[in-house]
Image (cartoon, coloured by chain):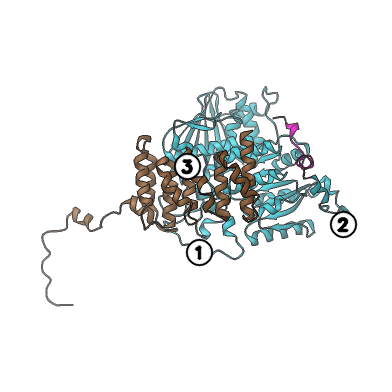
Amino acid sequence: MNPSTLLSRRDFLQKTGLATAVAAAPLILPSGLRGQNAPSKKITVGIIGCGNISDSHFPAILGYPESVRILAVCDVDKERRDESAAMVNKSYGSSDCKAYADFRELNRRSDIDAVFVCTPDHWHALVAIDAMRNGKDVYVEKPLTLTIQEGRALVDAARKYNRVAQHGTQHRSMKRFHDVAEFVRNQGLGKLDRIECYIPPNNRHCGATWTPEPVPAGLDWDMWLGPAPWRPYTSLGCHYNFRFISECAYGQVTNWGAHYLDIGQWALDMDNSGPVSVEGHGEFPSSGLFTNSTKVDFTVRYANGVPMHCRTRHDGGGTVRFVGERGWLDIARNKMSASSNDLLREMQASGKKIQLPLSNNHHENFFDCVRTRKMPIADVGIGHRTTTVCNLGQIGMVLGRKLRWDPAKEEFIGDDMANRLRGRAMRSPWALI
Amino acid sequence: MSDKASPPAAKTTRSAVDRKSSAGTTPDPWEACVRIEYGGDRSLAWSVREEIIATPPQGHAGAEARLLKALARPDCTDAGRAFVCQMLVMVAGATSVPALAALVRDAKSTEAARYALAAIPGPEATAALRDALGALSGPAKAGLIGSIALRGDASVRYALAGIKDNPSEAAIVREAATRALEHLANAKA
């Protein structure tokens, strides 16, 4: 897709006949009142989901007071949304950041340019698609979606509505990961033998049974569940812990796999494709609220024969290691090591034949693209492919047998059961349309 | 306590077999899985799940039959019904459609049944979803419309257009019909 074809919000609204609504809408921030730049020069933002993951976005976005403005926050938990709105307003010294309980109301505001989707995973697709349908650019937290089917729908919506859509895999905007991917892409390790991803273990645990609890005041539990199958409320299965319940997420496979498998995909030049097979064995709890694997171990294999392993690392955080005929490179967020210092020196050298796009700040890259209408460093098309690898691992471990995958058709070959696990029906009234 | 001396211990002790028998009979997981409750022990349901996953394609019809038999049990709980329908997602075919068609029309069971029906390929499941349109209302009807649209069932266009323009329908249903019509039009294009 030609990046120049991405429409600005204003163009979008005119094209879709919503310009009248914009014209009729009040100015966002009368600049003369608070001595700020003209509102039209600022990117106006809404943040949907005010839980754990939004904690990393608020300070980052508030760090651009001259160019970006948070106008609205949304959460189904009143305490969270009110606290977030108050925090934003305190930071700006104003009172115009509004709190919403329903993301659809926020998305329908004609004065918001971009939306950050920071909800639990099972909501990502619906919230992002609704935002793009309403002319917003989106920054969608990782994993891009819960299922493969949702990911394809989200990417299709981004293309249909010409939106800038960034996946929240910020390793793509960290030079260390960029350099390694570029080095591997340029055969710096010689012939690549394998990639080894290690992801952290589960950091929450529960017993074999649980007790339904009254829904706390201020929490809209029905809306929190949204498209996920109904179950009674328990504090064990709501904020943060949702990631360990397969109706809402796929555990550390998607939570951390989305980061480290993503670098493998990048280094392999698989941003528009993926592996051709998966095989794995996870350890899943046979009772209790949590249903996702406590121990992850799967391998995807690419058409060139290179395998990428993903395993739980019980002694620490995530890493990705590239092993080739010239040695190995091991990279994490805070460290990098290699089998020899020569490899590290070569990696830093300039003039490589293949040069990967460079971004040093994931938020800035997104905001730049909102202004320029260029493709972001981690466009959702790329994010979908990486999230698909996570899903392949999940499905491979659930079924416990080798599966063949057609990355072009995005379907398993010869395994009807596996294909049925690529998507799922949503609870009423939600649907992926 | 009696001061009378205790009789000497019997020479015979309970054998390993006796100890096992005193533990009682293990419930049949295929029966027990429909009685699970939210928050309760689901380990027997897990056994069923593992068995289904390990079933080769030629055994899917047999697994499907066992699930349908479980689904028909009168002691089926809401959680049990949801579980069985989630299992049907993996193995169900046209054989399951009549039972699910009845459940999808009932507001109490429509979500679980639609979850399974949506995964079943073929015209039988498509027809079951379409035929339930007149039986549901409110959010359940909106969700049903979404599932119908995702199957690309263009034969419902006329019905959806009627729903979209019917002021007596709930706003959420009319909105779903509008979205479904758009989806079907795009799919055709």
Q: Residues within 10 Å of mark 1 (few under 14, many from 20)?
A: few
Query: Would you name the residue on which mark 1 appears?
Result: A213
Residue A11 falls inside the magenta stretch:
yes
Q: Are the residues flagged by discs 3 and 2 from a single subunit?
A: no
Query: Would you name the residue on which mark 3 appears?
Result: B125
Q: Residues within 10 Å of mark 3 (few under 14, many from 20)?
A: many
**Image check: A92 left or right of B184?**
right
Query: Would you name the residue on which mark 2 appears?
Result: A33
Q: Is residue A226 visible?
A: yes
Q: Which mark is residue B73?
A: none
Mark found first going from the N terminus, 2 or 1:
2
Span shown in magenta? A1-18
Q: Are marks 3 and 2 in contact (CB under 8 Å)?
A: no
Indicate the colour of chain B: brown
The letter of the cyan chain is A
Q: CA distance from mark 3 to mark 1?
A: 37 Å
Q: Is residue A200 visible?
A: no
Q: Amino acid at mark 3?
A: Ala
Q: Amino acid at mark 2?
A: Leu
Q: Secondary structure at mark 3?
A: helix
